[in-house]
Amino acid sequence: MSASARLRDVILCGTDFTRPAQQAADVAASLAATLERPLLLVHAAEPASGARLSRAIKALVKPRRDDLRAEAARLAARGATVVDEVHVGHADEVLVARARATAARLIIVASMGSRRGGRHHLGSISERTAESAPVPTIVVRDAAPFRAWLDGVRPLRVFVGFDFTVSGEAAFELVRELRRAGPCEVTVGQASWPDDLARVGYPDAPWSASGLSSAQETLERSLRDRAQALLGDEPAGVMIRPAGGKADAALVEMAREARADLIITGTHQYQGLPRLLGSSVSRGVLRQAPVSVATAPAQAVRRRLPPVPAIRRVLVTTDFSPRGNRAVAHAFGLTPSGGTVRLVHVTPPRSVSASEYESTLAPSARHSRYVQACGRRLRELIPPEAGPLGIAVETAVVERADAAPGICEEAERFGADVIVMGSQGRSALGRVVLGSVAQAVMAASTRPVFVVRSPKV
């Protein structure tokens, strides 16, 4: 069995022997040496249209093999274990195939290069590789920051574009891998859409350049909490800017502000007609960014077990019924010492009792007194064990005509790790006829929902 046949967990690098490709190979070799992984250096010789494979091998492979061996020897001087291979075929297809065959950890390529045969409209080799590879792909535009980082001169400044999707989580997988090689200064950015403001209960909030609005602070806290959950205790800055219809442009601009050396985005890797007709944020970043870009495929995350989440912030809602109040006890049972429980009651804006409403256009003194009374009732539900258990408690009366959206918005503003609710446990037919707040929250919320069933009488 050959050495290349036994290769696993490699850093894979494609080269066409140009100066940009040599710089990308320098980065790959240094990273492979630091991570103690083998470097697989691949050159793909593309046959001319209509050429027979036997002729292609003779005409293309033999002259390139000596060049590749010389390049491999140069890179081995950096301390990497280098295996070189020459293949006949399109470079992006060869790299993707070798990545699958060797269970590669990472692909590193230069930003230049395109296929023969007038197929430029389908994207560069680096772009096509990034949109097909089963592992993250780093497209190197400037090797100097990587050299300084791997030589221990300074941290690598990494900007992560995140959108709370599985592909976004894949970007953090790559950050963790890079941190094994050296310190990284991480900034996480989100391109915000109007739906994001509506999700936290501020659908009409204006965007402030100073970033001091309640809506922006809520979005930033949510982004910071998610980044910490995915990165651990390592610090990361956060930035949120309006997408303005072009999320890729917003991310590139944020990366400029952060003075990033590397931009990392997740990618869904759409193929076929969806790829041609759709708008890909990762592809837009690849084409527009003035610095190196890495893409991380969502499939890489789907193949792995997710990290165990930490439950620190629990939101529990009650309508003051016995089933709602039972949920409060379970919320405190779920919350560890040092965590926080937020008790929430949702009431219509002009309510003056549980079933009576005013006909006035604005809240009155009677309504204010009712809201205050609801707040007192919430505080009365705090179990005496909360203090000794080291659980912090917050209460909030949310004024919303529809309870389910009010609960979801409050959970986003609070940054809840889980929502706890009571339910009567109606039959399927009963839910259809009568409706269920718990059912509506489970359908609409992006956060886990813990439903406490009422015991049978």
Image: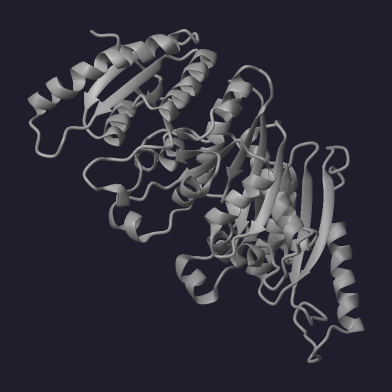
Against 408, residue 138 (above or below) is above
Q: Determine whether, in the image, residue 395 is placed left or right of residue 410.
A: right
What residue appears at the point 39 percent right and 24 percent down from the top-left corner? 12
Q: Determine whether, in the image, residue 216 is placed left or right of residue 144.
A: right
Q: Quadrant of the N terminus?
A: top left
Give the percent coordinates (x, y) of residue 279.
43, 58
State whether residue 452 appears in this view: no
Q: Quadrant of the C terminus?
A: bottom right
What residue appears at the point 43 percent right and 27 percent down from the top-left corner? 19
Q: What is the image's colouring? A: one colour
Picture quadrant where residue 379 is located: bottom right
Against 195, residue 53 (above or below) is above
Number of numbered markers: 0
Q: Determine whether, in the image, residue 374 is placed left or right of residue 143.
A: right
Picture quadrant where residue 444 is located: bottom right
Depth check: give the residue in front, 360 or 77: 77
Depth check: give the residue in front, 52 or 277: 52
Against 3, residue 384 (above or below) is below
Furthest-bottom residue in view? 359
Give the percent coordinates (x, y) of residue 23.
47, 25
Give the percent coordinates (x, y) of residue 21.
41, 27
What residue appears at the point 81 percent right and 62 percent down from the top-left corner? 396
What residue appears at the point 81 percent right and 79 percent down from the top-left corner? 353
Give the percent coordinates (x, y) of residue 25.
44, 22
State whether residue 252 appears in this view: yes
